[in-house]
C-alpha cells in the first residue's frame, strides 16, 4: 500500500484553499497558485482523500460534506472529527489493535517499523513512521515516547 | 490607546558609518487592532517590532505601552518568532510552562499551559520534544507559549514564513479563529510580514514602510469582511492597492 506523506496541518490547509475556490479546484491550478510542484501537493491531496475530506475526479479536487463540517467548526471540534477520520484509516486501525493486544498497550519503535515496512513499500520507513505518528497524535489515538522509543495507546479524555 | 510609537528612529553604526534603518515612525495601537507591518526587505520592519516589544532601544523617540515606557520584560506583551525559538531539550508542555515560571507555579502553571495547549490544538503533543514536531506544530507551540502569558499585545515576526504553503494557510486560519474568540488574549496584534497577500488576509490595518530607512508610507484600514477569501476580486483589489504603495 501507499501512505500519503502529508501532515494533518497540510491536509487542513489544502481543504481551506479548495474552500476558497468554492469547494472545488483543479489540482494543477492549485499547485500553480501556491508555486508548488504537483509532486509537492499530491501527498496532501492523497491524504485528504484517504481521510474522506475530498473526492478527486479527473484532476479536480472537491470537498466532501465532512470537510465542510470540519472547516465550519473551531479548533477543538476539528480534533474530534480528525480523531474519527484517522481512527478509520486501515493501517492505523491495525496498529491500534496490535497495541490493544500487546502488554501495557505499548510497542517498540523497532517492531512498529518492521510492521509498517511489511505494509508500506518504501526504503524510507522512518519518514512514514513520523507521518503516521503525526496523524495519530493529532487524533489522540497513538502516541510515541522518544525516550523509551515506544509507541503507546493514548488515553481518551 | 494601548501603545504609542512616538518619533522612533534607529541608526546603526558600522566602521564609523551611520546607517539609518528607521526614520521617525509614529503610530498608535488601539484595542482590537490587527496590524500588519509590510515593506520591502531591509526596510527595518523586524527592527521596529523589536523596538516595540522593548528588545531593542530606538536611537531616538520612544514606545509607550499604556502610557509607560516599554520594558523588555513587560508581561503584557508577547512575541512569536519566525524560527519558533523553542528549547530543544524541553517538551512542548515544558516550553510553555517555562514562560509562566516567574508568575505561576506548579498546578496553576500546568493548568494555564494545558488551557493554551488545547486552544491551539496541541493536546496529545504535551510530552513531545520539538525535534519530533513538524514546522506547523512547532509554531503552534510558539503561539501557545505567547498566549499563555495572556498578553494584551501580541507581536509576531514573520510567523508563517518558515512553513510550507499549505501548513501556513492552516495556521493563519487557526490564528484568526483564536483572534475572533473574545475570551482569548490578546487585545491587539502587530505582525511583521513581507507577504502582501498574507497581510491583506490577516489584518484590519496595514502599515506600509518604505525602503531603508523605513518611513511610514501608508496606514490603511482594510475594510474586508471576515472570513476573507483570496479568490474574491475585492480581496485582490486590496492586494493591488498595497503593492502599488510599496513599489
Image (spheres, helix red, strand yellow):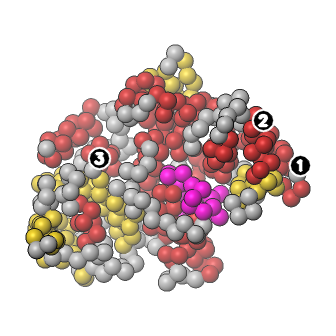
Indicate which disc residue B195 carries: 3
Residue with the mark numbered 2: A118
> Which element type, helix, strand or loop, lies under badge 3?
loop
Residue drawn at the location 85% of the way across and 49% of the way down: A100
Specify whether residue B134 is painted magenta.
yes
Q: Is residue B155 left or right of residue A89?
A: left
Q: Is residue B173 left or right of residue A106?
A: left
The image quarter containing residue A43 is top right
> Which element type, helix, strand or loop, lies under badge 1?
helix
Q: Work out whether A36 lies above or below A107.
A: above
Q: Is residue B105 left or right of residue A103?
A: left
Spot the residue most to the front: B15
Q: Answer few, some or many: residues within 10 Å of disc 2's Cα (few below 14, many 20 plus, some between 14 and 19).
A: few
Specify whether residue A133 is painted magenta.
no
- Residues indicated by labels 3 and 2 sit on the same polypeptide chain: no
Q: Quadrant of the C terminus of chain B?
A: top left
Give the mark, 2 or 1, whose residue is nearer the N terminus.
1
Q: Position of residue B178 (x, y in %)?
A: 45, 56
Q: Position of residue B216 (x, y in %)?
A: 13, 58
Q: Work out whether A29 lies above or below B42.
A: above
Residue with the mark numbered 1: A101
Q: Would you say residue A65 is visible in this rendering?
A: no
**Is mark 2 in CB contact (under 8 Å) with mark 1?**
no
Q: Position of residue A84 (x, y in %)?
A: 69, 42
Q: Answer few, some or many: residues within 10 Å of disc 3's Cα (few below 14, many 20 plus, some between 14 and 19).
A: some
B84 or B27: nearer the viewer: B84
In front: label 3 or label 2: 2
Measured Cα–Cα span from mark 2 to mark 1: 19 Å
- Residues indicated by labels 3 and 1 sit on the same polypeptide chain: no
Indicate which disc residue A153 carries: none
Residue bounds of the magenta highlight:
B116-137
Q: Position of residue B177 (x, y in %)?
A: 45, 52
Amino acid at each position: 500500500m501507499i501512505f500519503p506523506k502529508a501532515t494533518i496541518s497540510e491536509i487542513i490547509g489544502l481543504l481551506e484553499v479548495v474552500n476558497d475556490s468554492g469547494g472545488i479546484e483543479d489540482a494543477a491550478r492549485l499547485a500553480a497558485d501556491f508555486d508548488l510542484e504537483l509532486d509537492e501537493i499530491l501527498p496532501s491531496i492523497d491524504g485528504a482523500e484517504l481521510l474522506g475530506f475530498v473526492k478527486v475526479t479527473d484532476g479536480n479536487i472537491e470537498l466532501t460534506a465532512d470537510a465542510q463540517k470540519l472547516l465550519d467548526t473551531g479548533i477543538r471540534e476539528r480534533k474530534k472529527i480528525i480523531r474519527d477520520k484517522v481512527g478509520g484509516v486501515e493501517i492505523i486501525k491495525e496498529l491500534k489493535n496490535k497495541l490493544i493486544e500487546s502488554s501495557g498497550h505499548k510497542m517498540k519503535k523497532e517492531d512498529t517499523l518492521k510492521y509498517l515496512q511489511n505494509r508500506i513499500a518504501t526504503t524510507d520507513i522512518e519518514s512514514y513512521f513520523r507521518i503516521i505518528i503525526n496523524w495519530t497524535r493529532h487524533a489522540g489515538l497513538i502516541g510515541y515516547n522518544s525516550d523509551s522509543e515506544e509507541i503507546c495507546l493514548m488515553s481518551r479524555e | 490607546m494601548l501603545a504609542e510609537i512616538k518619533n522612533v528612529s534607529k541608526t546603526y553604526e558600522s566602521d564609523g558609518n551611520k546607517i539609518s534603518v528607521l526614520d521617525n515612525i509614529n503610530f498608535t495601537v488601539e484595542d482590537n487592532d490587527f496590524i500588519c507591518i509590510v515593506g520591502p526587505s531591509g526596510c527595518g520592519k523586524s527592527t521596529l517590532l523589536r523596538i516595540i516589544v522593548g528588545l531593542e532601544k530606538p536611537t531616538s523617540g520612544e514606545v509607550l505601552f499604556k502610557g509607560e515606557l516599554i520594558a523588555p520584560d513587560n508581561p503584557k506583551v508577547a512575541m512569536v518568532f519566525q524560527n519558533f525559538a523553542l528549547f530543544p531539550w524541553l517538551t512542548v508542555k515544558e516550553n510553555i510552562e517555562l514562560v509562566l515560571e516567574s508568575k505561576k507555579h506548579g498546578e496553576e502553571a500546568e493548568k494555564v499551559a494545558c488551557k493554551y495547549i488545547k486552544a491551539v490544538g496541541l493536546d496529545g503533543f504535551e510530552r513531545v520534544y520539538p525535534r519530533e514536531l513538524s514546522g506547523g506544530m512547532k509554531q503552534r507551540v510558539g503561539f501557545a507559549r505567547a498566549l499563555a502569558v495572556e498578553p494584551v499585545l501580541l507581536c509576531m515576526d514573520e510567523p508563517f514564513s518558515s512553513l510550507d504553503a499549505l501548513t501556513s494557510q492552516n495556521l493563519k486560519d487557526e490564528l484568526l479563529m483564536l483572534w475572533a474568540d473574545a475570551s482569548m488574549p490578546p487585545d491587539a496584534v502587530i505582525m511583521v510580514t513581507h507577504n502582501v497577500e498574507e497581510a491583506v488576509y490577516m489584518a484590519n490595518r496595514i502599515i506600509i514602510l518604505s525602503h531603508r530607512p523605513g518611513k511610514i508610507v501608508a496606514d490603511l484600514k482594510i475594510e474586508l469582511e471576515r472570513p476573507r477569501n483570496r479568490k474574491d476580486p475585492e480581496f485582490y483589489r486590496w492586494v493591488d492597492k498595497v503593492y502599488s504603495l510599496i513599489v
